Amino acid sequence: MTFDLINCLYVFVLAGFIGFEVIRRVSPLLHTPLMSLTNALDAIVVVAAIIIAGRHDSTLSTVLGAVAVAAAFSNMVGGFLITDRMLRMFKLSKAKKQ
Amino acid sequence: MSHILQQQLIDVAYIVAVTLFVLALKWLSSPATAKHGVLAGEFGAALAVTATLCDYQIIEYKWVIVALAVGAIVGIPLGLVPMTAVPQRTALSHAFGALAAAMIGIAEYYVRIPHLTKFEMTEIALEVIIGSLTFTGSLIAAGKLQELLPQRPITYRGQNFVSLSVLGAAILIALWLMFHPESSHLFPAMVGVSLVFGVMLVTPIGGADMPTVISLLNSYAGLSAALLGFVLNNKVLVVAGALDGSSGFILSVIMCKAMNRSFTNVMFGAFGQVQVSAAAAKEERPVHIATAEEAASILAAANTVVIVPGYGMAVAQAQHKVRELFDALTKKGIDVKFGIHPVAGRMPGHMNVLLGEADIPYDRLFDMDSINPEFPQTDVALVIGANDVTNPAAKTDQGSPIYGMPILEVDKARTVMVIKRSLNPGFAGIDNPLYYEDKTLMLFGDAKGFVGDIVRELAGVGH
């Protein structure tokens, strides 16, 4: 068990650093799409929810799992959709395009 | 296929997904590559979900399918909201994300009670506490942004003490559970207390502090997902949560710096209600008032114009009229730029999205650090619905509550025009000396209507 914990801590610390370095470089122009995109990525908890809802341990866990699947999946769908819509709105001026 | 092989294939799919997630954020560094970023993210997420659906542990698909369908039905309209509603949508999605994480943590607790170790119990308790408080906190934030709840800070005497005691209670129960994981009657109490704390955490925070609060809740939502990854030993959750958490954290730091305030001050300071009396006591000073006609002729004579939009522009839904103004001035050969303060709007980057929606090209949008050196060469700075972010007192008046806050230095422009409903002070109730300067012209009226009038006058000028 503690071995798993250490493993996860490694991954967490390294991913945190990667996140910090990558996100620091995101243009301030795109901070709103950044938030909606990370939201959609965070909705990957849906994979854990799917297992819980499908594993059928007990009625309680199936219900909680199904609620979690719906909540997380709505974030995933909505998050990608709105990020895509926002990014389509960012256009260069005509002079710059030529 | 053996279970071990299947598990390994799922793990490979997860690693590919995680790589795509990092690339997605990397490509967000510039608007030119950002679209690839979304695609990479979508592909990664689809891959991870598909792989999970093949997991041998799933014995009953009925509820999974129903829940996915419900998620899609709720998610699609939430992806189609107008850009003005993006802050509340974002807060709501933090709530959903945290709800999902909390629900899974709760389910895991009840499944594992008979053989929970101290470590597992600590992880679950921490995860469920953070998930629960982020859920209710984000709902309150969404309510405030949607104006279902009052935007002003709601405070009472001894509030911080009460709030922290509630959080303390949640932690005490968690500690007890750590040593006695089988006390399952206490678990719902811990969840309940954490839910209450989330409400208490956000109610005292005012509307103008929402950019910081949303970023902070973003960070918490990421943290709860990462912790869930610890509970389930699922690395894709740890990575996605760490990315989301660091993103929220970086944005909160940027927002705090842009207001020259600390986290503690935003969370426990209850800004924006104390200074009103001080401002009201000020004597009436004369201001220069101009009409749309006068404003239009000054703009038409300018070579360089910087427009400074604030939340007031979004409230008045004036962004499309502003675009017409931009077009009219650009057509006359005038160089028009937009200067955007980091905390303009109700969430980080909100103003850029609103202007983007109104078809204003993004190479005309400049952040504070790149536009400030240009103000001395600017003929006209036109402030639309922004107040405190242009207040020169932030640099000169040590007694001002916003002293030290970085501002857009519009007072350095040759002429300043301010479109404003009235002389009422902004959210913090702070008087703005900019309005009384000789070079400042006040354009009193509704932002949308007034900009429309200027555009009409500009069309007439030169006939």
Image (cartoon, coloured by chain):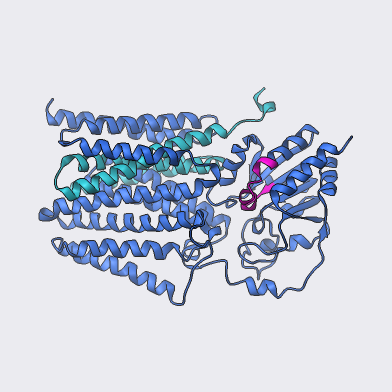
Q: Nearer the viewer, residue B259 or B211?
A: B211
Give the image location of residue B120, x and y in percent.
19, 53
Give the image location of residue B218, x and y in percent.
42, 50
- Farthest-out residue, right: B463
Chain with blue colouring:
B
Q: Nearer the viewer, residue B243 or A91?
A: A91
Tell me: A28 left or right of B455: left
Query: Can residue B340 be seen?
Result: yes
Taking the spot 61% from the left edge, 65% from the top edge, the residue there is B428
Q: Quadrant of residue B191?
A: bottom left
Rendered position, B286 above or below A74: below
Image quarter where the C terminus of chain B lies is top right
Query: Can residue A2 be seen?
Result: no
Taking the spot 44% from the left edge, 37% from the top edge, the residue there is B25
Give the image location of residue B275, x and y in percent.
62, 71
Q: In this picture, which residue range is highlighted in magenta?
A: B308-322
- Farthest-out residue, top: A98
Rendered position, B365 above or below B439: above
Taking the spot 79% from the left edge, 40% from the top edge, the residue there is B456
Main SS type for the magenta part?
Answer: helix
Give the image location of residue A48, x and y in percent.
25, 42
Tell me: B115 left or right of B104: left
Tell me: B460 left or right of B350: right
Taking the spot 84% from the left edge, 46% from the top edge, the residue there is B298
Q: Is residue B232 magenta?
A: no
Chain with cyan colouring:
A
- Farthest-out residue, bottom: B157
